[in-house]
Amino acid sequence: MSKNAKTTKARNSRNRKPTPEKAEAPAVDLAEVLEPQAEAPAPETPAEAEAPAIDTKAKVAETLAWLREAQAAHRDAKLADRAADKAAARAARPKGMGCLEAAYIVLLDFPHGLDAKAIIRRMSDRELWKSPAGLTPWATIYAGITREISAKGPSARFARGEKKGLFIANPLLAENA
């Protein structure tokens, strides 16, 4: 028998010894745990005799309902805090021209088209848009323009130029601008 056959045989689940199954813990009802096991002692004073008996099942159900409500309120408060944080971050973001709007303005001046790197150069020369921290802003422009062309089709602001990698302002929309 080869070495590989031995290891395969050892790994085969049919060749293993059966393991004893683990016993599962029985489900426990909280009300049963909290119920008194022995009868309550007889009241020693008349005030104790007049006091109403405590219904433990009702008390447990009431406590569980309160716990569920508290958990739901906590979850709702966390979601509200997250929404408020997102709204504050959105409000703090500077309002400026986006990269695609700036690219469209640049392309309106060049009817023969530009490639993505030339668009970025022209945008930074005219100070229309600057990449916040990106290392390859031309890839961002290229991807954004192609995504808009594929999503909007003939109504997109951009169109492909005659050569590969060139983009032009959509002539149908440029006439109206």
Image (spheres, rainbow, N blue to C red):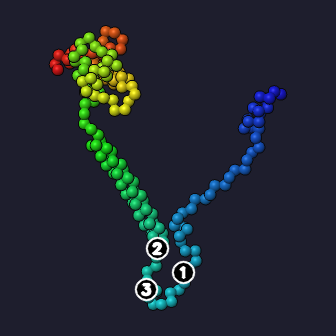
Left or right, 45 with reference to 147: right
Q: Which residue is mark 3?
A: 50
User: From this viewpoint, which residue is outermost toward the left?
Assistant: 176
The label on residue 29 is: none
Q: Residue at x 38, y 23 (%)?
A: 139
User: From this viewpoint, which residue is outermost toward the front?
Assistant: 125
The amino acid at mark 2 is Asp
Depth check, front residue: 1 or 168: 168
Give the alpha-carbon distance from disc 1 to disc 3, as whole Å.
14 Å
Residue 107: percent from left, percent from top: 25, 18
Q: In the figure, 59 relative to 116: above or below?
A: below
* Mark 3, secondary structure of its residue: helix
Residue 141: percent from left, percent from top: 33, 23
The amino acid at mark 1 is Ala
* Mark 1, secondary structure of its residue: loop
Q: Callout 1 environment at 10 Å: few (<14), some (14 to 19), or many (20+)?
A: few
The amino acid at mark 3 is Glu
**Visible residue check, residue 156:** no
Q: Which residue is mark 2?
A: 55
Which picture quadrant has residue 104?
A: top left
Give the alpha-carbon distance from disc 2 to disc 3, as whole Å.
15 Å
Q: Residue at x 76, y 41 (%)?
A: 16
Which comes before the other along the chain, label 1 or label 3? 1
Callout 1–callout 2 Cβ contact below 8 Å:
no
Q: Callout 2 environment at 10 Å: few (<14), some (14 to 19), or many (20+)?
A: few
Callout 2–callout 3 Cβ contact below 8 Å:
no
Depth check, front residue: 133 or 164: 133
Q: Which residue is mark 1?
A: 40
Q: Residue at x 46, y 73 (%)?
A: 55
* Mark 2, secondary structure of its residue: loop
